[in-house]
Image (tube, grey):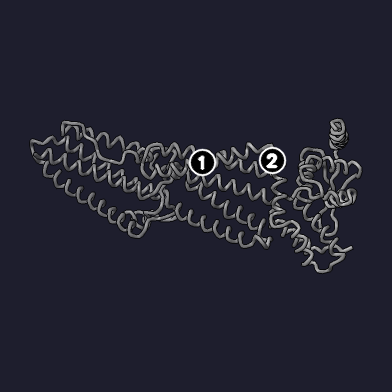
């Protein structure tokens, strides 16, 4: 039910908010369906953001004051666009930087093991 | 590009709501999302119903409810402790009220205290906390009003029933107000919020019928009158007591005339007793009439008078106004003083303390300003019984002197 993809859900759970904030920092405003499609497109279908993961996260980010919404009538229904607030913008930069550093650190760990192995041989 | 029409969008909205979406904002999100999914598929497949079924199948049976639950959980994480406390308070008050009822039935001590505590927890803590939580969960506007109306009518009704159990005044007024809110505010709001929803229709109608049924039964309990058998019995008692008073007074008159010419009898004493007994009789008769009149404005004075004498069941289910016997020409206070002075006379003759037998706790209520409307039957019977008692004691006084 969480994020369905080729990666395990534990791996993606901690990065969900960062993914949403990053996407919104690059696009002025996006609606829910658009976000899921965008993620699918960028990752070539390797990450599939489901509704069950996306909407609770969007509502939580809105309640925390990181996102705001704009409503527009499209077709015969209401469409809600999500947009970063000023706090949200700062938070996005902060979280993206943190994740980048984390990936670098992970890389270091992942590279240590083979080296150690080679030494022991 | 396919664009869904208004009816199709409305159908999807109902489906989402039926599957467990409660927050208005989340419903809007999911509605747009699912519409986008369907529109995209309909570029390839033209059968709306088939596409709708396939799309909803992606979510599975509990998919939408899970999204709602997850959102609610994330938004109300910070009030989790409040939710738990509320649930505990709810269970505690339910148990307290249940145990209190058991104690009340068996007349064990402590029932009153438990009722006060349970009623307080239920109406002043549980209901308001529950409403606060619902508002924090950001449910849709009509449902918030539904919850406000439900909480309000529940609050008033619980207090009304509680007042009734404690024999406090205004109980019936409170219960009736609560029921009126439940029937004419809560129920229409409830039906408005859910009836458009096809999947919820059966549940909605069932709940509505149950609410109406429960309200009617409660109303019947609040306004219940005596059964025919009880009415007849009470009327018989009333006639017999009135006859008894007439007979006793007639007998006393004969006895008095006999004694008055007896040279060794203290005429002043029996004269005083006669005056006092007659005054109490007169006061009580006026009092019964005034009290009954004040509560039954629709009936003419002569009808009430006639009802008190011959057609008692026609008024016995009614109420009188106690204020009519608290001030003016006849008052409960003055009556009590007269009775006391009559007791003094009896004491003088019998040489020991003498108490007139009467329903003291009821007479205390009649002079207590907190109570106004009171069942006619009870007050009239208490007064009549007191009158019999006084006239009989007058008989014993005369008989004692005759010896």
What residue is shown at x 54% (from left), y 45% (from top)?
Answer: B156
User: Farthest residue toward the bottom?
Assistant: B47
Q: Label 1 belongs to which residue?
A: B93
Quadrant for the C terminus of chain B, please: top left
**Residue B69 percent across, percent down from the top left:** 69, 47
Q: Is residue A105 visible?
A: no
Mark 1 or 2: in front is 2
Nearest the camera: B380 or B398? B380
Quadrant for the N terminus of chain B, please: bottom right
Please identify the quarter of the rendering in which residue B17 is found. Answer: bottom right
Do circles 1 and 2 both sit on a common chain? Answer: yes
- Pointer 1: residues within 10 angstroms few (<14), some, or many (20+)? many
> Disc 1: which chain?
B
Q: Element type at marker 2? A: loop
Q: CA distance from mark 1 to mark 2?
A: 24 Å
B400 horizontally vs B53: left or right? left
**Residue A59 percent across, percent down from the top left:** 77, 44
**Residue B282 percent across, percent down from the top left:** 29, 45
Please identify the quarter of the rendering in which residue B164 is found. Answer: top left
Q: Is residue B364 visible?
A: yes
């Amino acid at each position: 039910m969480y994020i369905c993809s080729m990666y395990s859900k534990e791996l993606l759970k901690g990065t969900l908010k960062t993914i949403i904030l990053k996407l919104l920092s690059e696009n002025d405003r996006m609606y829910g369906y658009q976000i899921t499609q965008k993620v699918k497109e960028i990752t070539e279908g390797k990450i599939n953001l489901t509704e069950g993961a996306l909407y609770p996260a969007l509502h939580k980010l809105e309640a925390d004051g990181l996102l705001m919404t704009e409503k527009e009538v499209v077709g015969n229904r209401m469409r809600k666009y999500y947009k970063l607030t000023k706090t949200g913008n700062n938070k996005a930069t902060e979280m993206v930087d943190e994740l980048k550093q984390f990936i670098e650190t992970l890389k270091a760990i992942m590279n240590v093991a083979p080296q150690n192995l080679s030494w022991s041989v | 590009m396919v664009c869904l029409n208004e009816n199709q969008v409305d159908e999807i909205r109902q489906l989402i709501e039926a599957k467990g979406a409660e927050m208005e904002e989340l419903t809007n999100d999911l509605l747009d999302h699912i519409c986008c999914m369907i529109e995209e598929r309909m570029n390839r497949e033209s059968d709306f119903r088939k596409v709708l079924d396939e799309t909803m199948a992606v979510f599975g049976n509990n998919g939408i409810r899970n999204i709602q639950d997850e959102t609610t959980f994330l938004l109300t994480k910070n009030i989790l402790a409040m939710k738990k406390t509320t649930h505990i308070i709810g269970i505690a008050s339910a148990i307290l009220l249940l145990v209190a009822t058991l104690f009340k039935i068996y007349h064990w001590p402590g029932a009153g205290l438990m009722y006060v505590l349970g009623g307080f927890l239920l109406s002043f803590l549980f209901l308001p906390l529950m409403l606060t939580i619902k508002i924090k969960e950001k449910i849709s506007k009509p449902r918030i009003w539904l919850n406000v109306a439900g909480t309000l009518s529940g609050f008033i009704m619980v207090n009304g029933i509680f007042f009734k159990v404690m024999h406090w005044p205004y109980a019936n007024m409170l219960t009736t107000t609560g029921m009126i809110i439940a029937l004419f505010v809560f129920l229409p709001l409830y039906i408005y919020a859910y009836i458009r929803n096809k999947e919820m229709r059966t549940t909605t109608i069932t709940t509505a019928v149950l609410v109406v049924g429960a309200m009617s039964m409660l109303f019947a309990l609040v306004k219940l009158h005596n059964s025919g058998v009880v009415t007849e019995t009470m009327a018989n008692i009333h006639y017999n007591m009135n006859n008894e008073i007439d007979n006793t007074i007639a007998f006393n008159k004969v006895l008095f005339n006999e004694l008055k010419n007896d040279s060794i009898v203290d005429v002043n004493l029996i004269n005083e007793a006669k005056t006092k007994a007659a005054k109490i009789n007169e006061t009580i008769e006026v009092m019964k009439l005034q009290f009954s009149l004040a509560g039954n404005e629709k009936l003419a004075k002569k009808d009430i008078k006639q009802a008190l004498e011959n057609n008692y069941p026609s008024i016995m289910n009614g109420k009188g106004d106690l204020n009519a016997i608290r001030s003016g020409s006849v008052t409960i206070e003055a009556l009590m003083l007269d009775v006391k002075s009559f007791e003094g006379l009896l004491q003088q003759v019998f040489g020991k303390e003498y108490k007139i037998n009467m329903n003291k706790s009821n007479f205390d209520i009649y002079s207590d300003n907190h109570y106004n409307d009171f069942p006619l039957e009870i007050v009239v019977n208490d007064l009549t019984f007191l009158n019999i008692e006084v006239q009989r004691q007058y008989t014993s006084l005369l008989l004692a002197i005759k010896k």
